[in-house]
Image (cartoon, grey):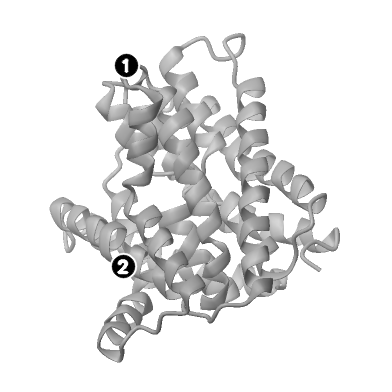
Amino acid sequence: MTFIVSAKQIVIMFLLMLLGFLTGRLGMIHKETAKDLTNFLLYIISPCLIVNAYLVGFSMKRLIEFFQAILAVTLVYSVSIIVSHLIINKKFFKDQETRSVLLYGSAYSNAGFMGIPLVSAILGESAVFFSVPYLVVCNFFMWTHGVALFSIEHKRSLRLRFLDALKNPNVIAAFIGFVIFVSGIKLPELVLTPIKSLVSVNTPLSMVVVGTNLGAISFSSKKNLKTVVFGTFARNIMIPLICLFILLSVPISGQAAWAILIMASCPVPAVVVLFSLLNNFDAEVPTSYLCLSTLCTIFTLPLIVLVAQSLGYGG
């Protein structure tokens, strides 16, 4: 993968996002419509994309690479969480709500909603296979450690939070796809054709919906600008670079290596706003954080790719 290819694909995706932003602002796509499209993407199209990624034919080499990716992503997330707690602490961020939002946003990326479309657009559909381990590990950490950062979820047991992670549609699709991959089951054309048709609209529709959701965000003040800028720096640059150096030290290469790095370099996950609202947090910091981090990705992700290439990553 080259810097120019990644930059070009990201610009194309952000043009689609701009289209969504404008149609949202002009009232052509309403709030409820955007919500319905978001659910359709999360619960229908994204699982289809994951299942489709497994329809590559079984090989021991791919199976080994799959489990290597699982281990690599687990290491990446473990270190990311530790680093986020070190740099976002009570000494520098005294407000608990702000600290929770920054911790969540810096440790976790928008892997499902932006990561898979980015991997598919930049590396091709075959690389989505290696995005699945990232999604599985990501969902495990997000629904255990992640939700524990928000006070209301402290009352829920680790077992219940783990079950939440397993009930995620992307995780369910990952297990179904893995069974298909290992068993060599051939899906009938009647099932395969609709899946591939849905997969083909994932990237453009995802970006339009992201843009529409960003268009619905309003900002009342700039008092939290420094906080949001620091959080964006941590999420978009610091954590991805740390992940890069971790991945350079583990036995993983090719599409698997690039897929993981792209997923790790994605912006703040939109769910940070949802968790904030569910816990009656002030929505200004998470919404500003989400918006700035997402917009900055057009510059920061190609930068991470450029640094990775200069270090001989993925070879």
Identified at 35% across, 64% down, the residue is: 47
- Depth check, front residue: 18 or 97: 97
Quadrant position of the N terminus in the picture: bottom right
Indicate which label's residue lies in the foreground, 2 or 1.
1
Identify the image quadrant of the C terminus: bottom right
Residue position for label 1: 155
Front position in the image: 221 or 173: 173
Could you say where residue 17 lies in the image, as x and y percent from the top left?
39, 62
Q: Nearer the viewer, residue 69 or 84?
A: 69
Where disc 1 sits, the SS reads helix
Residue 123 sits in quarter: bottom right
Q: Amino acid at mark 1?
A: Lys
Q: What residue do we see at 79% from left, 63% from top?
A: 309
Q: Nearer the viewer, residue 166 or 96?
A: 166
On the image, which quarter does residue 207 sit in? bottom left
Counting residues from the N terminus, which is met first, the one under dot 2 or under dot 1? 2
Q: Quadrant of residue 92?
A: top right
Q: Residue at x 37, y 17 (%)?
A: 154
Q: What residue is pinned by disc 2? A: 45
Q: Amino acid under label 2?
A: Ile
Q: Is residue 104 left or right of residue 67?
A: left
Does residue 54 show up? no
